[in-house]
Amino acid sequence: MALAMRMGRIVSGSVVILMAMELMTGMIISSRSGSSSSAYRFGFGAVDAGPGGGGLSMNYYTLSCPMAEFIVKNTVNAALQADPTLAAGLIRMHFHDCFIEGCDASILLDSTEDNTAEKDSPANLSLRGYDVIDDAKDQLEQQCPGVVSCADILAMAARDAVFFAGGPVYDIPKGRKDGKRSKIEDTINLPSPTFNASQLISMFAHHGLTAQDMVALSGAHTLGVARCSSFKNRVTGSTPDADLDSNFAKTLSKTCSGGDNAEQAFDATRNDFDNLYFNALQRKAGLLSSDQTLFSSPRTSRFVNSYALNQAMFFFDFQQAMRKMGSLDIKFDHSSNAQPLPLELDFYEGDARHHLLRLPATVFSVTTLL
Ligand code: HEM
C-alpha cells in the first residue's frame, strides 16, 4: 500500500483513468482472442515473455507515455482526413516492415553511402505514408523522448488506418524495439505479385502464418491500388488468362496504356475497408495474379468464399492475423527498461519516465483504486 501511495504522488488522475481503460481493453482482447494457441498471450502482464522475460504488452506505454496511443491515432486520423488513400500505404508499410527482419521499423531506415536500405528496393518504392509516421514520432519525442519505438508507431498506425477506413477495431500489444539492419537484399523475402497460392502459403508459413491468415491478410487489398508494372503479366501473355474476366482484362489493358506507373484500384471501393475484394476474386476480377490465385486454388478458395459471404468473419480473422503478423520476430530490449519491474523498486525517484516502463499488473490494480 505504501508503494501504491508513492505511485499516487506521480500518477495524475487522468493517467489513472487511462491506465484503467488500457487494462480493460487488455481484458477484452484477451477474452476474445483465444490466447492459448497463440504465439503471444494477451493480459495484464508481459506478453510472450522472451528468454530474458521481456515481451509485448497491451499496457506497455501506460505509465511511460500514457498519451502514446492517443497521439498516434490523432495523427493518423488527421492525415487520413486530408488524404484517405494513405490508409492503404500505412497498412502495407507495416506488412513490409514485419516480413523483413521482423516488425522493427527497418523499413524506415534510409540508405547510406555503404548500404542500400530496404526502402530503396523496387518492392518498396511505391510505399506511402512515411510522413505520417515521422509526424507521430516527432510528437511522441516531444511528449516522452526516447520511449516509443518506431516499430510500435507503425503497428499502431496500421491498426488505426484499418479502423479509419471502416475496418475492425482491435487493440495490439506494444513493446517492439527498433532494429538497425536494413538491407535491400533482404527484400527478396517479400511475396511477388506473380506467386501462386502454394508459393504464398509456404512464404507465409515461414513466418508462422497459416493459409487462412494469408488469405485474411491479403484482404488488406480491399484498400489501395497497384501499378501496371505489378499486374501487366495478366494481360500481356500470348494466350488469354483463363482466370481473368474478359471485361476486367480490357480495363487492365486500358489502364496499362497509361504506362507502367498507371494505377488500378484493387476493388470498387479503394478507400473503404470491406469485403468487396473477395467478391471481385469470385468474379475473376482480382488485380494481381497473387490475388486471383487465392480463388483459383483449392487450397485457399474456401476462405475467399467465406469472406465474400461474411464480412464479419473477414474482419474477425483479419484482426487476428494482423496481431499475429505484428508480432513477428520481435526484438526485445533485454537491458534496463523493457523488463517488468520488481515491486520493491523505488518508482518515483530519478527519471520517472524511464523507470516506469513495465509495472506489474498487480500494481496497476492497486493504483487504480487510489
Ligand atoms: C499475399 C501476398 C501479397 C502480395 C504478393 C502483395 C503484393 C502487392 C503489390 C504488388 C501491390 C502493388 C504495388 C504497386 O504496384 O505499387 C500491393 C499493394 C498493397 N498491398 Fe499487398 N501484397 C500481399 C499481401 C499484402 C498484405 C499481407 C498486406 C497488409 C496486411 C498488403 C497490403 C497492401 C496494400 C494496402 C496495398 C495498396 C497500397 C497503396 O495503395 O499504396 N498486401 N501489394
Image (tube, rainbow, N blue to C red):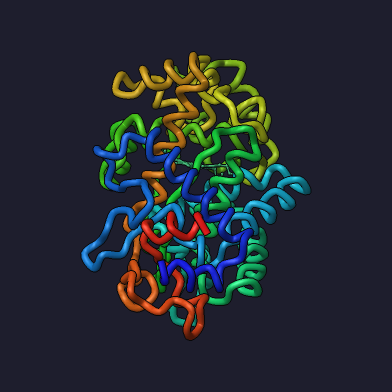
List the single residue furthest toward the right.
Answer: 82
What residue is at 66 percent from the left and 25 percent from the top?
A: 268
39 with respect to 214 (left or right): left
105 with respect to 70 (left or right): left
What residue is at 38 percent from the left and 40 percent from the top?
A: 30
In the rendering, at what x and y percent does residue 328 appear?
34, 52
What residue is at 36 percent from the left and 17 percent from the top?
A: 302
150 w.r.t. 305: above or below: below
Rendered image quadrant of residue 303: top left
294 with respect to 22 (left or right): left
List the single residue furthest toward the bottom.
Answer: 350
Q: Is residue 244 visible from the viewing direction of this image?
A: no
Q: Is residue 12 visible from the viewing direction of this image?
A: yes
In the rendering, at what x and y percent does residue 222 appear?
57, 31
Q: Quadrant of the N terminus?
A: bottom left
Q: Viewer-proximal residue, 62 or 264?
A: 62
Q: Viewer-proximal residue, 253 or 296?
A: 296
In the rendering, at what x and y percent does residue 300 appear?
34, 24
What residue is at 72 percent from the left and 52 percent from the top?
A: 79
